[in-house]
Amino acid sequence: MAEWVGAALQDDMRPRMFELARRGEAFALATIVAADGGPRPVGSQMVITGGDRSGFLSGGCIEADVASHGREVLKTGEPRVLVYGSGSPFIDIRLPCGGRLEIVVERVAPDDAASNALQASMQARRPAWWSSNGRQRWCGPEPRGSCQGELRVLRRYDPPQRLIVVGSDPFALAIAGLGAQIGWEAVLLAPFGPAEPPPARVGYDRRPLHLSLRELAPDRWTAIAVATHDLAGDEAALLPALLSDAGYVGALGSRRKIQERVERLREAGLTQASIDRLHTPIGLAIGAQNPWEVAVAVAAQIIEHNRRAGAADQVPTMELEDARAAR
């Protein structure tokens, strides 16, 4: 890689796609549809314009070439299937991992109906399926059964991961701040907390929890981390959190307080099934001590939980049918 490409740190390409659409600018969308090895999974994407690119598909060995093809697709409107590694016609481009990547590159107009539908689903926090034959695209709550033409791409988009942190001390700040840094929608809830916004670039709500949590309406793509360091405060946050649809709920605290916390939740009327959803002490057991270490442990546990809970349902699904005929 000849230069630092900060935009390559972006993983979810939807914000970039919608930004370009608002500006009335077409773009090329490159998607990995098959992978044998390599650092990036099937479904990874790049967005390419005449002057820049966002996202990444490998360790930096093919991005410039993909961008070059993307700009040709922008000019001609003709989709391309690119193969790198084993069986590739690009003998001068090698994958250090020794694997194989197949990538579909398609032109998306700023008024593309599928892109508009995808934006609506994201704003409503609904999952959506993107179906494409390279020239036409569809987006809806279910995968399209068939596409005309040999080239077929299916990709599931889930709502963005959201992280709700309850608390106002350095641990809460670090957890929310790290969540925002890794691309999650992070919001800090601190009832009657400081009037000024937190130093971390996160959302902030200081209203009572029953108001803020109800408005946020936690869903399965929401993680709630409670870091109040107070059993009564924990209970006020954990009761609505464990009764919500949140995909992950965790509470910061010492191991010697676990049983007391569980008993308080049971006395408050929670079933054992609801209590069993609680991760406490929060975070992976890595011996974390300071706020940033705890934040790393919490983020890692949320990622691990999401992968286990949604391995079959949440991972983007891609399909390529007889791609050679579309070259």
Image (cartoon, rainbow, N blue to C red):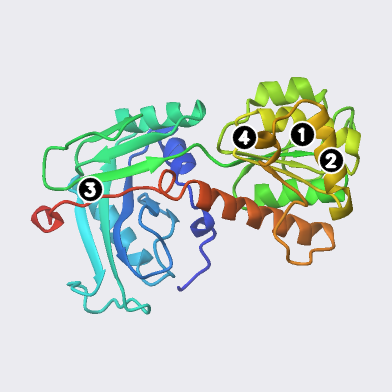
- Which residue is denoted by mark 4 in the rendering? 246
Disc nearer the start of the sequence (4/2): 4
- Which residue is denoted by mark 2 in the rendering? 261
Asked if the residue at tag 1 contacts the one at tag 2, i.e. Cβ–Cβ closer than 8 Å, the answer is yes
Within 10 Å of disc 1 (Cα), the crowding (few <14, some 14-19, many 20+) is: many
Residue drawn at (44%, 70%) of the image:
59
Q: Check disc 4 and give the amino acid type.
A: Ala
**In terms of depth relative to the viewer, which is nearer, 30 or 274?**
274
**Which numbered tag is attached to residue 75?**
3
Occupied quadrant, residue 85: bottom left
Q: List x then y, in percent, for residue 305.
A: 58, 51
Residue drawn at (84%, 54%) of the image:
255
**In terms of depth relative to the viewer, which is nearer, 245 or 7?**
245
Q: Check disc 3 and give the amino acid type.
A: Lys
Residue drawn at (23%, 48%) of the image:
75
Q: Tell me the element at label 3.
A: helix
